[in-house]
Image (cartoon, rainbow, N blue to C red):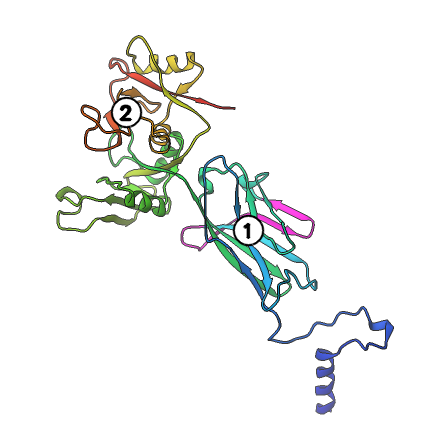
Amino acid sequence: MRSLLFLVLISACWAEPHPGNSSLEHERIVHIQGNGPRLLVVAEQAKIFSHRGGNVTLPCKFYHEHTSAGGSGTHRIRVKWTKLTYDYLKEVDVFVAMGHHRKSYGGYQGRVWLRESSENDASLVMGDVRLEDYGRYKCEVIEGLEDDTAVVALNLEGVVFPYSPRLGRYNLNFHEAQRACAEQDAVVASFDQLYDAWRSGLDWCNAGWLSDGSVQYPITKPREPCGGRNTVPGVRNYGFWDKDKSRYDVFCFTSNFNGRFYYLIHPTKLTYDEAVQACLKDGSQIAKVGQIFAAWKLLGYDRCDAGWLADGSVRYPISRPRKRCSPSEAAVRFVGFPDKKHKLYGVYCFRAYN
């Protein structure tokens, strides 16, 4: 009896349709074997660069090991794109495709689709790239019981800038920091963005929130008030703090913009309210802090005139250091948060293009 059962099981697993039996020619038998072609998912580039408002393709293709074919034809292919959080513990759904069915999620709706330049192309095309699109994306391909993944990083060209409100340093919890950056046409910077800014020369002695909830600050010139004179340059890490109760500054990130940033030529200096109205009368709005940093860093904007910005601060951008205009370094110079009703300055405006 045991021998008969063993023979039946072997027959079930390895039976092939008999070539002479026409009634079995279209039957499909699944072979249970461990050495068949394995599904492989490959990202031809691990890091992709884009900018706000642009279109970008996140590469992803799938193959079977030892073959050039995309799919075996045995099972329908399911492609799923997700965005990874900084610690890889959570995934945000972006796009799913299976057969003729397509679905995008959240803020990606209407902006993402598969390129499908070939039968094994699972690359994701993303339009109208936004600041919050920055990060790592996972391409997962599933075929029957086989699946594999690849990760692609989407980087944005832009600038990191430190920010503190009118109340002064160390007055923002994490949620307030997020709102503060958003109000200045920016998002909270990631550690990678701050690290890249540090490598490009950013030096700032006040600790600020980053997007992962950590608090850090970049030092290129070690000195006593900033970690000590005998320490090495680097990004100092305060660790992770209570997002509701702890208060620090914030590092914001912004990218290019679709519009015109300019200093308004006006016959007189202005109070804050007069500055707001002057920009409106000129068909624009008073510029935000993120916009002056983007114009300075990405467009080389240079102007030695201090002007009001939307948050009530007064700043001016210098890309060509010279006497009486930031002689030591290129920077967006910060005058402060003057009295809005009595202090008089120029104004920086921003006109968005439709």
The residue to which callout 1 is attached is 81
Quarter occupied by the N terminus:
bottom right
- Let me know if residue 309 is in the magenta part: no
On screen, residue 239 above or below 35:
above
Which one is in front, 29 or 114?
114
Give coordinates of residue 346: x percent, y percent.
30, 16
CA distance separating discs 2 and 1: 42 Å
Which one is in front, 245 or 60?
60
The residue to which callout 2 is attached is 315
How packed mark 2 is, by other alpha carbons closer than 10 Å (few <14, some 14-19, many 20 or more), is many
Left or right of residue 227: residue 285: right
Residue pictured at 31% horizontal, 22% vertical: 312
Give coordinates of residue 103: x percent, y percent.
62, 46
- Circle nearer the N terminus (2, 1): 1
Kind of residue indicated by mark 1: Trp
Give coordinates of residue 131: x percent, y percent.
44, 38
Query: Magenta-highlighted stretch: main secondary structure?
Result: strand
What's the magenta region? 85-104
How packed mark 1 is, by other alpha carbons closer than 10 Å (few <14, some 14-19, many 20 or more), is many
Left or right of residue 243: residue 221: left
